[in-house]
Image: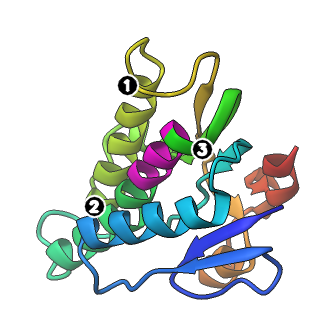
Amino acid sequence: WVASIDVQENEEASANVVVKMTDSFTEQADQVTAEVGKLLGTEKVDAILCVAGGWAGGNAKSKSLFKNCDLMWKQSVWTSTISSHLATKHLKEGGLLTLAGARAALDGTPGMIGYGMAKAAVHQLCQSLAGKSSGLPPGAAAVALLPVTLDTPVNRKSMPEADFSSWTPLEFLVE
């Protein structure tokens, strides 16, 4: 059973929760929490996989700095935080929560400030979730995936001259 929480329906999912990008963080969080609660009731799941994210470049001088920071925060931090909260309610003991981090955020990201800030926040969240009083069920694990570049059709199209052999295949993430 797979539920998709996104800005559009996923026809391959067993259930969908569709959020509006124009809603505030608290509106999205309240909607998702309520709808997932209705879908699952008292059932618990083995894993919650937050695979949301995106990329936007720009340094501190960029005209799009504020817009890109806002977008990156919504796509990475909001989704990871909501997923973490869902884990406290619906994850089985010993379950798995995965969040979409990024290797780049372990260092400075001067050419992609919004992206780096958001991914660094996801890493901080994951580290906090590893603590004893994080609210996760007993024995649950929270992990952040830290790929360099995911091998997706969108990334290949936007970086056609790149060395695809160094990218992380999506099949690797599934394993």
Quadrant for the N terminus in the image: bottom right
Left or right: where does residue 88 sit relative to residue 27?
right
Judging depth in this view, the residue of 51 and 164 nearest the camera is 51
Judging depth in this view, the residue of 160 and 51 nearest the camera is 51
Q: Secondary structure at mark 1?
A: helix
Give the distance between the C-alpha atoms of the residues marked 2 and 3, in whole angstroms.
Answer: 31 Å
Q: Please state which of the two labelled residues, at mark 3 or mark 1, is closer to the viewer.
A: 3
The magenta stretch is 80-88
- How crowded pointer 1 is (Cα within 10 Å; few <14, some 14-19, many 20+) is rated as few
Instruction: Name which residue lies at 66% across and 58% down.
Output: 40
Left or right: where does residue 175 sit relative to residue 156?
right
Placement of 175 over or under 25, stated as above or below: above
Earlier in the chain: of badge 3 and badge 1, it is 3
Give the distance between the C-alpha atoms of the residues marked 3 and 1, in whole angstroms.
Answer: 19 Å
Say whether residue 85 is magenta.
yes
Q: Secondary structure at mark 3?
A: helix
Q: Is residue 54 visible?
A: no
Say whether residue 25 is magenta.
no
Instruction: Name which residue lies at 55% across and 76% down.
Output: 6
- How crowded pointer 3 is (Cα within 10 Å; few <14, some 14-19, many 20+) is rated as many
Quadrant for the C terminus in the image: top right
Q: Tell me whether circle 3 and circle 1 mark residues in contact (CB < 8 Å).
A: no
Q: Amino acid at mark 1?
A: Ser
Q: Residue furthest top?
A: 132
- Residue ID for mark 2: 114
Q: Amino acid at mark 2?
A: Gly
Instruction: Name which residue lies at 22% across and 64% down.
Output: 59
**Residue 87 is drawn in which quadrant?**
top right
Earlier in the chain: of badge 1 and badge 2, it is 2
- How crowded pointer 2 is (Cα within 10 Å; few <14, some 14-19, many 20+) is rated as many
Placement of 122 over or under 7, stated as above or below: above
Placement of 54 over or under 166, stated as above or below: below
